[in-house]
Image (cartoon, rainbow, N blue to C red):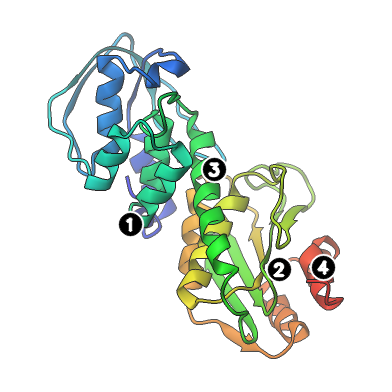
Amino acid sequence: ENPKEWLHMSLERFLAMRLSLYRGAVVLRVEDAARPPRLLQDVQLLALSQRPVEVYLQFRKPPRGVYFSEYSPPMGPSAPAERVEVEGTPALPRAAEKAYSDVDLKAAEAVVELYRHGLEVAYISRALSVGALGGRRRRLVPTRWAITAVDKIVSDHLVEKVKDYPEVDGYYLYARRTVGNLFIAILAPSKWAYEWGEAFEPHTVWNPGGSVEMELDYELYGGRRDYPGIGGCYYAARLATAEALMRMRRQAAAILWREVYTGFTTPTGVWWVRENVRAMYKDEPARFDTLEEALEAASYLLKIPLERWLTKSRIVHLLKNRLV
């Protein structure tokens, strides 16, 4: 249950592992998280446990189907649960135990606190989803909302710190190739700004059509007030970028583009973007003196013509006109 480990698996092995997981479903009210019944308490403690816990699960009928989402990792067959019994003892990190028992700690504050104590965002989003974090009015949260909420809350926290650092001292170009995907990042000397763009070739996930589909969203120094139309990958890559800048003790205008190539047809969830962008930033970048040089180098890596990216990119336009 660790996306960092999933990244080192083949896609086939990852899917086989995830789709072999059986899920039991129970009906609860969103508000039950504030005063959880025994079953929900057990689920919350299971979600917060750092080690596997044995659980006895009896289904009402045979589990069926699989679940794919652009936000969540794939999941295997499910069915209503007749009985759920926790047979092991959950082991909670001290920070998580404290956040779980503190009904005066707001959810966003709990998210940041757990991250500061070194707990992974996948763990934190799981805790948020089952209603284990927040004040006296805790709520159950859909998984997809919890994942993006944690990516946004943590990256907001980091970006505010990044804004206090000096700008990078040149143009840094990062790239990462993985199965069916290319990730590119350019960090430019500027106050904080960020854009995330995706291009899908025909016959790929989310693009069954016959032409390349491109979308892009961005923010400037003041951030954005609305949810990006491009979806949760925006915040997953933003988190990885903010983490990289924190390690460098620098701020920058960050231009991130992803190309998805024909044949990549399986939705994997936003963890795929977050962990690949994290891995990309761990490699040594190519350094350039000008934006034009960095873009020219990127053009040799990109499959889709650079001109098409430039017609979409708002941050490149602003950098060229020295507006950021």
Callout 4, which amino acid?
A: Leu
Which quarter of the figure has residue 173? bottom right
Residue shown at 12% from the left, 30% from the top: 88
Indicate the secondary structure of the residue bearing disc 1.
loop
The first of marks 3 and 2 along the sequence is 3
Residue tagged 1: 118
Q: Indicate which label's residue lies in the foreground, 3 or 1.
A: 1
The first of marks 4 and 2 along the sequence is 2
The circle on residue 303 is 2
Q: Indicate which label's residue lies in the foreground, 2 or 1.
A: 1
Q: Indicate which label's residue lies in the foreground, 4 or 2.
A: 4
- Quarter of the picture containing the C terminus is bottom right
Residue shown at 66% from the left, 68% from the top: 192
Q: Are marks 4 and 2 in contact (CB under 8 Å)?
A: no
> In x, y percent, where is residue 228?
70, 46
Q: On the rendered structure, is 74 left or right of 55?
A: right
Indicate the secondary structure of the residue bearing disc 3.
helix
Residue tagged 3: 148
Q: How crowded is mark 4: few (under 14 residues within 10 Å), some or many (20 or more)?
A: few
For the residues marked 3 and 1, what is the alpha-carbon distance in whole angstroms?
19 Å
35 vs 44, nearest the viewer? 35
Question: Eyeballing the image, is 277 above or below 248?
Answer: above
Q: Residues within 10 Å of mark 1 (few under 14, many from 20)?
A: few
Q: Do the residues labelled 4 and 3 touch (CB within 8 Å)?
A: no
Callout 2, which amino acid?
A: Lys
Residue at the extreme left of the image, as rendered: 88
Callout 3, which amino acid?
A: Thr
Callout 1, which amino acid?
A: Gly
The first of marks 4 and 3 along the sequence is 3
